[in-house]
Amino acid sequence: MKQLTIAAALLASLGLASTAAHAESDFGLEDYKIYTGIGYGQYSFQWEDRENDTSFDDDSSMLKAYVGTKINPYWSFELAYENFDEASDIDNSAEIDGISLSTRLSAPLNEYFSVYAKGGWLEWDADIYADIPAVGRVSSNLEGGDWLYGAGVEFHLNENINMRLEYTRYELEDDIDPDMDVAAVSIEYQF
């Protein structure tokens, strides 16, 4: 189901690119741009399960792929697939992936640099395993949707290629009260 959702989102983005080309020629929207990119980051994942008296704290890596549309130099929308590698400690492990939709508000500082803030929604899946004394290995699959927010710096390397450094906080709401913070670098191409 998730693969079908990703495929539909990518097809919709390609449709947006075609619509954007027509909009630019018909309505003079020179600032309207479509972009795509990939990113790599490190994340910290922490949770505490008071009911089972277990806790978890580890760092791991993540990958993301995204497409977006820049309405003007200050405002854009972005759809991303985010895959968080397994984080684990002695008795517990967790693996999360999801699809997010966010908006970015940018402030160009000059022709080479912009700062931005972003906010959005993440639909996520998590596989969590815990080894509990006197009970054994317990596993569960959780899914949900939660808010995300962040900030970053964008470097304009040339007319079509940008690089980003960003921090994002994912506010995952669940009984285990998880926190997830990501520091990432991305490269994107603007059409």
Image: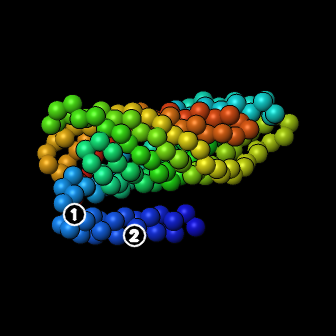
The Cα–Cα distance between marks 2 and 1, rounded to whole angstroms, is 24 Å
Quadrant housing residue 186: top left
Q: Position of residue 39 (x, y in %)?
A: 35, 46
Quadrant assignment for the N terminus: bottom right
Residue sitting at x 76%, y 44%: 137
Residue carrying label 2? 11
Residue at figure coordinates x 25%, y 55% from the top left: 32
Location of residue 159 with respect to 119 vertically, above or below = below
Q: Which residue type carries mark 1? A: Phe
Number of the label disc, if any, that sits on residue 159: none
Number of other residues with Cα within 10 Å of mark 2, as a class: few under 14, some 14 to 19, many 20 or more: few
Is residue 116 at all visible to an observer of this figure? yes
Q: Nearer the viewer, mark 2 or mark 1?
A: 1
How is colour applied across the structure in the image? Answer: rainbow
Q: Residue at x 49, y 51 (%)?
A: 100
Q: Position of residue 149 (x, y in %)?
A: 48, 37
Give the mark nearest the N terminus, 2 or 1.
Answer: 2
